[in-house]
Amino acid sequence: MGDSLLLKCVENPERERAYTIEFESSEFTALYAVTGQPIFATVSISYVPGEMCVEQMSLKQYLGSFREEKVFYEGAVNKIVDDFVRACDPLSLDVTGDFTVRGGIETRVSVAYEREDEV
C-alpha cells in the first residue's frame, strides 16, 4: 500500500532552527479494504524537519499511489507516518486523515510521532 520509494527528500536549508512545515491534500483516494468502494480524505501533515525535508511533488505522487490500494483508514494513516519517518527522519510529525462520510459516520484518524532522543 502506498509506494514509499516515491518520497524524495532534500537537505533542510535551515537546520539551525526548529520550524514546522504543513501540507494538506484534499485529493487522497483509495479503496476501502472491506467493500472495495472508493474512499476520499483530506490528509494533513505537520512536521518539524531534522536534516531533511520531504520534497512537495514527491509527496503528491506518494499520496496518489494509494489510489488503487485497498486500505483501512487506520492502516493508511499509520503507513503514511511510517513511510514519512523512514524517508526524512523528522523531529516530530502529526498526520491526520479526515475521511468523508460513509454510512452516516465521519472518521478522523490522527497519529503523532516524536523522534526519541539519541543517547
Image: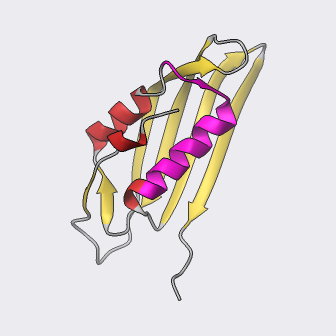
**Total number of numbered labels?**
0
Q: Position of residue 26 (x, y in %)?
A: 46, 27
Q: Is residue 14 above or below residue 105?
A: below
Q: Per the image, is 26 magenta?
A: no
Q: Per the image, is 69 magenta?
A: yes
Q: How is the image coloured?
A: secondary structure
Q: Is residue 86 above or below residue 18?
A: above
Q: Residue at x 40, y 26 (%)?
A: 64
Q: Residue furthest right?
A: 104
Which residues make up the magenta segment?
68-86
Q: Is residue 24 left or right of residue 77?
A: left
Q: Position of residue 11 (x, y in %)?
A: 23, 63
Q: Is residue 41 above or below residue 44?
A: above
Is the magenta region chiefly helix, strand or loop?
helix
Q: Position of residue 53 (x, y in %)?
A: 31, 57
Quadrant in the picture for residue 74: top right
